[in-house]
Amino acid sequence: MKWTNWSGSVTGAPSEIARPKTETELAALVARAEKVRVVGAGHSFMPLCETGGTLLSLADLEGSVELSADKTRVWAPAGWSLAKLTAALWEEGVSLINQGDVNPQSLAGAIGTGTHGTGAELGSISTAARAFRLMMADGSIVTCSETERPDLFRAARLSLGLVGVATAIEIDVLPAYHLEERVESHPIEEIEERWDELAKSNRHVEFFIFPYGSHVALKTLNPAPAEGPLKHMTDMDDRLFKMVCDVCSVAPFLTSRLQPHIIGPGVRQRRVGPAYQIFPSDRTVKFEEMEYELPRANGWAALKEVIAWIGKRKLPVTFPFEFRLTAADDIWLSPFNATPGASISMHQYAKMPWRDLFAEAEPIFRAHGGRPHWAKRHTLTARDVDTLYPDAAKFKSVRDAIDPSAKFANAHLMQLFDIQGRAA
Ligand SMILES: Cc1cc2nc3c(=O)[nH]c(=O)nc-3n(C[C@H](O)[C@H](O)[C@H](O)COP(=O)(O)OP(=O)(O)OC[C@H]3O[C@@H](n4cnc5c(N)ncnc54)[C@H](O)[C@@H]3O)c2cc1C
């Protein structure tokens, strides 16, 4: 049986792929399998879902959203996509606190990898998790929260699927809100100068910059009163961009000449709509990605250094960098642990070579104190994990107790967390 992730860079051959409809069905599958991985939308670039054993999708598992009486929390099926979840929440009069660029990810996949959007004061989606309903290796169910099995809860907040199969997750929500999105182009020097003020004065702020571009596409999102029906369902039209990527994939030397024309002066766009429709955008051009979360004060220096390195080496990096902000948290495996972050995403067109590019750029991010996004390309070793994450030992001790036979671990994660047992 063949399985491939979204970008096409990870392929696997699970012995079985199953889509259980009930927890009883799921329990039977988990209890009898020797090795289990769960897949959400398969949007991770790292081989997190790769397995030679049983690959489970929880997309069809029965369940519904259950809102707390005070409407501040909701239990939601872990396998639902953020698209399905946020539409259902809107019907209930609530919204997620923050979202990333797209919404096909499953709730459990987003929480399990520390997926984040942007906002100087806003944490990753993992920080919104309040409780988990988890299936253990023998098919039994436990729940955990800050007050019930607190150590398991702390591990589950960002677990890469290593501490059980999440069937439902309780998350914080806000009263439903609309967002005004503005996308405007500005010279990069101007944005660097205004950055601290932009970060303070906008609930969400980020920008995209091509390595050979002079202008950034600055995107801000702020709560706003509702307006008429939403006319455009995405932030930027990427048809011209796709053409440029295709040209550069056969003539890489044109990258530096074509890129400055994609984001030029004079871009001014505005739209207002329900938050759950404004947050996600279409990302139709397939890419591979590495993302490093830098201590916030080092973000600009790291970005400028990596762009200068690309320019000096004339490297054909066809995608823009994305620069975002995330608040600090206290999650054991979070790259934002104790550190307000500036995130730098480095992408490459999926049809072009990316492995050497990322491997050479990675030391720049590491030298600036960066920790990688777990779902995106990195080359951390077990020793790096222990060095970068002071709480890794706590996570490992919970994992060892929960799953001593390493049923839920695959080869990649066994290497990363020094887990003993059968790898497949
Ligand atoms: C186009 C695109 C845009 C993206 N945008 C962003 C962004 O804006 N911000 C950001 O931070 N990241 C972003 N990402 C990364 C993405 O959010 C993460 O890879 C996320 O994990 C994907 O969710 P998924 O459902 O596809 O998870 P998968 O890749 O399927 O799985 C991720 C992990 O979660 C585990 N898992 C899944 N379901 C369960 C479950 N029920 N129980 C236990 N473990 C489970 C898996 O085993 C695996 O370890 C993007 C990726 C792509 C391809």
Image (cartoon, rainbow, N blue to C red):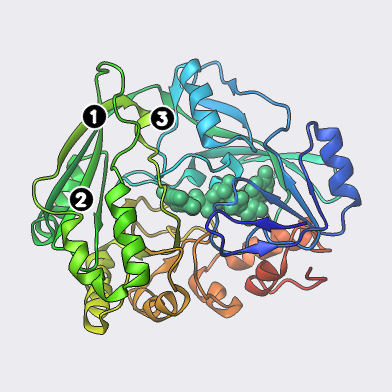
* x then y, percent, for residue 328: 39, 53
Query: Which residue occupies the foreground of this view, 210 or 24?
Result: 210
Check disc 1 and report its element: helix, strand or loop.
strand
Label 2 Cα crowd, 10 Å radius (few <14 / some 14-19 / many 20+): many
Query: Which residue occupies the foreground of this view, 250 or 281?
Result: 250
Q: Which mark is residue 271?
A: 1
Is residue 159 at all visible to an observer of this figure?
A: no
153 horizontally vs 361: left or right: right
71 horizontally vs 238: left or right: right
Check disc 2 and report its element: helix, strand or loop.
strand
* x then y, percent, for residue 121: 32, 44
Check disc 3 and report its element: helix, strand or loop.
helix
Amino acid type of disc 3? Tyr
Which callout, 3 or 1, points at the residue further toward the start of the chain? 1
Q: Which of the 4 image quadrants contains residue 232?
A: top left
Q: Is residue 242 above or below residue 67?
A: below
Is residue 293 at all visible to an observer of this figure?
A: yes
Quickly name the residue at label 3: 276
Amino acid type of disc 1? Arg
Amino acid type of disc 2? Ala
Name the residue rendered at 81%, 71% in the picture: 421
Q: Which of the 4 image quadrants contains residue 368?
A: bottom left
Question: Which quadrant does the N terminus fall into?
Answer: bottom right
Q: In front of the other: label 3 or label 1?
A: 1
- The Cα–Cα distance between marks 2 and 3, rounded to whole angstroms, is 21 Å
Q: Which of the 4 image quadrants contains residue 241?
A: bottom left
Query: Which residue occupies the foreground of this view, 142 or 252?
Result: 252
- The Cα–Cα distance between marks 3 and 1, rounded to whole angstroms, is 13 Å
* x then y, percent, for residue 88: 53, 22
Which callout, 2 or 3, points at the residue further toward the start of the chain? 2
